[in-house]
Image (cartoon, helix red, strand yellow):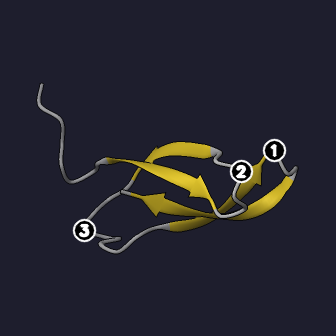
Amino acid sequence: MARNELRPVIKLRSTAGTGFTYVSRKNRREHPDRLTLKKYDPIVRKHVVFREER
């Protein structure tokens, strides 16, 4: 079965500078630009903004 390019796998990297990442999928049709989510960074032990890395 071929991978669906409509929902690619993306890396979300912490903006706190720790290098911590989450791996997720996104729908390119609904979110064509880079995704930003506020998630928990266990290294700094707080919620910070994570940005999509290409």
Horizontal and vertical percent position of residue 45:
88, 49
Q: Are the two marked residues, 2 and 1, in contact with CB atoms closer than 8 angstroms?
A: yes
User: Any mark on residue 29, and which?
Assistant: 3
Report the quarter where the N terminus lies: top left
- On residue 18, the disc is 2
Q: Is residue 29 left or right of residue 21?
A: left
- From this view, report whether residue 25 is shown above or below residue 51: above
Identified at 57% across, 54% down, the residue is 13
Horizontal and vertical percent position of residue 50? 61, 61
Q: Secondary structure at mark 1?
A: loop
Residue 49 found in image quarter: bottom right
Q: Residue at x 52, y 53 (%)?
A: 12
Give neighbour class at mark 2: few <14, some 14-19, many 20+ (Cα, 10 Å): few
Q: Quadrant of residue 31?
A: bottom left
The numbered disc on residue 32 is: none
Q: Which residue is mark 1?
A: 43
In space, the residues marked 2 and 1 are separated at their CA atoms by 7 Å
Name which residue lies at 40% across and 70% down.
34
